[in-house]
Image (spheres, rainbow, N blue to C red):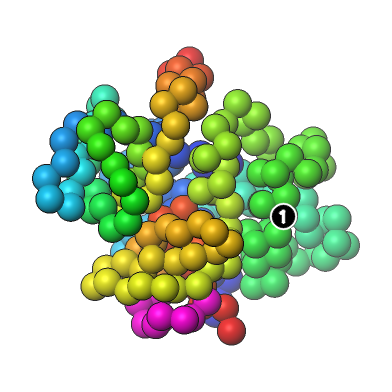
Amino acid sequence: MNPEILFLKYAFPCSFVLQQRGEINQDMFEYLERAVTQNEPVPQVVLEKIYFRAFSRIKALARELGQSEYFTEDMIRRYFTIRHNELLDGKLTTNKDKGLDIDPKAPPVLKQLCKVHTAEIIEAGSDFYVVQFGEKKRPVSRKLVPDASIGDKVTIHYGYAVERVV
Amino acid sequence: MCLAIPGKIKEIKNDKAIVDYGFEKREGKIVIGNYKKGDFVIIQGGLVIEKIPDQQAKDWLKAFQK
């Protein structure tokens, strides 16, 4: 999968928030939604501008690992499935070497939603899956992973299944 | 980090919740979970995905408006 497509799959659920916060307008939101559901790459320069917070942290992660290339599938997955969660858990101090800070006042429930989890599909509807991770069940949209079935494992971010885990 | 803004359920019709964000209203389908009028929730991809405890939602909204 090319990095532009993979990155947007993981970052797209944040677009709702960016729109709510007025950082992107409705046209941009719809463009991103179309691109992510049709697997069309959005130019890296556009992604870097919109999701500058995530990029600051991916770059910091790459620096830490001594990698000169930061926009790779491996780095994107490492960031979203590991580093991003560690930051939300407050396990790492967020200084300028780690990228931009996380709001410490944020409600715990929201931090949980924001985390990327690996979950099992236990129910499938026409436009959603119900997934389970640990004791927790959550409905997620199947828009980004339309062809998974019950029993499959997927990564989830907010209200979306992001990619199937093999 | 992109932490979402909760809205308040104004009305529930069958499996649809009408959620008020102050500046707009959105509709979300309830797939699992128990929700009632007045609950603070997060909607994404057309689904009601989570309930936010009242106090947490209120504090967050207050911090956000500043």
Eyeballing the image, is A46 above or below A34? above
Provide the secondary structure element on which disc 1 rests.
helix
Give the residue drawn at x 70%, y 72%.
Answer: A74
Whether residue A133 appears in this view of the structure is yes
In magenta, the rendered stretch is A145-153
Q: Residue furthest left?
A: B13
Report which quarter residue A107 is drawn in.
top right
Residue A141 in the magenta stretch? The answer is: no
Rate crowding at label 1 as few (under 14), some (14 to 19) or many (20 or more) other CA atoms within 10 Å: many
Taking depth in this image into account, of A143 and A70 the one nearest to the observer is A143
Q: Which residue is mark 1?
A: A83
Taking depth in this image into account, of A53 and A108 the one nearest to the observer is A108
In the image: residue A73, left or right of residue A16: right
> Whole-percent x and y of residue A19?
37, 40
In the image: residue B56, left or right of residue A130: right
Report which quarter residue A23 is drawn in.
top left
Magenta stretch mostly in which secondary structure? loop
Eyeballing the image, is A63 above or below B27? below
In the image: residue A23, left or right of residue A108: left
> Whole-percent x and y of residue A51?
54, 48
* Quadrant where the N terminus of chain B is found in the figure: top right
Give the residue drawn at x 85%, y 55%.
Answer: A64
Mark 1 falls within which chain? A
> Whole-percent x and y of residue A63?
83, 56
Give amino acid for label 1.
Arg
